[in-house]
Image (tube, rainbow, N blue to C red):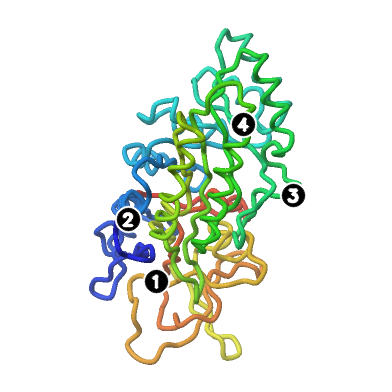
Amino acid sequence: MTTIRHTAPLAFPISNNQLMIGGFLASRLAERVGRTPFYAYDRNLVSARIAQLRAALPPEIQLHYAIKANPMPAVVQHLAGLVDGFDVASGGELKTVLDTPMPPDQISFAGPAKSLTELRQAIAAGIVINLESERELRAVTEIGVALGIQPRIAVRVNPDFELKSSGMKMSGGAKQFGIDAERVPAVLAAIKTLDLDFVGFHIFSGSQNLRAEAISEAQEKTLALAARLAHDAPAPVRSLNLGGGFGIPYFPGEQPLDLVAVGERLAELLPAARRELPTAEFIIELGRFIVGEAGVYLCRVVDRKLSRGQVFLVTDGGLHQHLAASGNFGQVIRKNYPVVVANRVSADGEPVTASVVGPLCTPLDVLADKMPLGHAQEGDLIAVLQSGAYGLTASPVDFLGHPTPTEILV
């Protein structure tokens, strides 16, 4: 077990005062792409993060990648050789993963509003469907009979606890996700009477958490809940998806997750869990943690304006392409992502404060507010770091009709 206490941030190196992405200087990479804005994902940093996870977590833990974090086909293809499975949330994502070498039995499908078409696709493909409701149970059963295929299913459970201090709470209380834990035994009893291949449980309690103790507490409660529910299961539990919740630091003052502490505590919990669930494969499902720090969004300064003493760097990128960095994707109080001048990282003299704004006709179109970026000039490149997850696909790209940015894996 590694002795590094915190997860080492995945960092883009600096060479000749320029950001290096995938071995390319930022300015050269922009020339290669041909236009700005664009997203760039560094394959070596993605691989490094998987290596960190493998080193810190118990060896029997299976790693799954949640496609929704970044569904770019090249990224998914790269990860197909690094992780043990994929988790999708739509028919579109399912098509992407079925183009990879990942075996169908290592793919699962979650989401509270799966259409009948999506369910038919999933059953025909032979992947695991995480049931979110009794409606889905009925639909899956009927489709299986119609197709002459025994559907592979797991029950997604809405537990009676949450992941404390998580950026987004996915469980506890009334939620649209999964089946309330107290109702699961009745659902399991119904599954016993149906022609379904019961695989296990999916228990996801929250996301974007930087506190190792909170993640470990949620994992302990998840294992205990799964053990209780297993007594009513129609077959031995073969798969237990513990969810994820591992966060990455975005804002000043945030500390990286103590991944080693999470792994050590999980190693302590697994022996008892194996006794309770001897046939189960234990899965941790991660998205942002795998790709978030490996991506950068680059846009170009079109104009450098001075307005009543404040410098504005007006760029060809904005919230329509990176909603999260603008603070309009879940932030209550807007905070700056890490942002640098990609082709001139350090200023020659004293740094000048500037705000980076986009081309949209709204004051919400801010990528960086009053940061030491004022040495940038027209034509320079602005890089928004921590942009590998929930970037392009989580943004309103059609707003005001600007071109959709390119995505590359380097």
* 1 and 4 marks in contact (CB < 8 Å): no
* Residue density around tag 2, few if under 14, some if 14–19, many if 20 or more, within 10 Å: many
Residue at 47% over, 36% down: 275
The numbered dot on residue 173 is: 3
Classify residue 308 as left or right of residue 211: right
Q: Nearer the viewer, mark 1 or mark 3?
A: 3
Q: What residue type is labelled 2?
A: Leu
State the SS at label 2.
helix
Q: In which quarter of the image is residue 5?
A: bottom left
| Residue identified by numbered label 1 | 379
Residue at 37% over, 53% down: 41
| Residue identified by numbered label 2 | 45
Classify residue 2 as left or right of residue 86: left
Q: Which of marks 2 and 3 is in front?
A: 3
| Residue identified by numbered label 4 | 155
State the SS at label 3.
loop
